[in-house]
Image: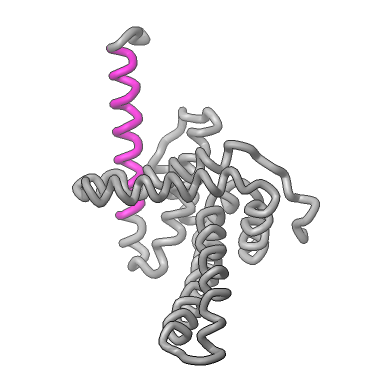
Amino acid sequence: MELRGPFGVIYNASLWVTKLAYVNILWIIFSLAGLILFGLFPATVSIFAIIRKWKKGDTDFPIFKTFWTFYRTEFVKSNQLGFILLVIGFILYVDLRILYFSEGFLQILYYPILILSFIFILVCLNAFPVYVHYELKAFQIIRTSFIRIIINPIPTIAMLGGTIVLWYLFTFLPGVIPFFGISLLTLVLVWSFFITIKEVRGVIIK
């Protein structure tokens, strides 16, 4: 029998809290299973894929089995994307550090690189929602993420705002991070991604 009224609301809320905690723990376990370096990105794609399914109304599936399936099948491509993002992020970080302590003409380049770094952060926020929504290769995911920022910035603004809110929440409540740190962030990013879906297939190189 389906619970109705306040008890039904409480039951459904507790059910979703449990699910979010469960997939967050799975993310930690599978990240560690890949020695973090090789497990982080497949686990991240897996949790995004599961929460995307929930967002689209598909809630009747085995969570562990589905998580493992995505982890296994997306292992190579997710690591390709992850390492590309890491390399780009590292290069931008090093450039910022060098330019910050430079003098003369080089210091003028600091602010353009800072702007590029901010755009890169926005691309990263979009990358995994794009990954699980479209069938694309690693570089196409990055390109599509950038295109989405230009074509329809509202979801990206929501992503950035939600991420900042969660940052402050976790600062005051660090004890919830092991249970909801990644799952809540994923929920915010996926929900923001679906605010308005703008198809960009016309500008994606297949």
x 72%, y 44%: residue: 199
The residue under the point 48% across, 85% down is 99
Q: Is residue 86 visible?
A: yes
Report the span colored magenta. Answer: 7-28
Closest to the observer: 158 or 6? 158
- In the rendered view, tell whether residue 143 sits above or below residue 87: above
Compared to residue 108, the image places residue 125 above or below, namely above
* Quadrant in which the C terminus appears: bottom right
Query: Is the magenta region chiefly helix, strand or loop?
Result: helix
Residue 102 x, y percent position in the rendering: 45, 90
| Residue at the image position 53 percent from the left and 58 percent from the top | 122
* Image position of 163 with respect to 120: above or below: above
Q: Residue at x 57, y 74 (%)?
A: 112
Q: In the rendered view, would you say 138 is above or below 170?
A: below
Q: Is residue 130 left or right of residue 86?
A: right
Is 196 one of the magenta-colored residues?
Answer: no
**172 to the left or right of 190:** left
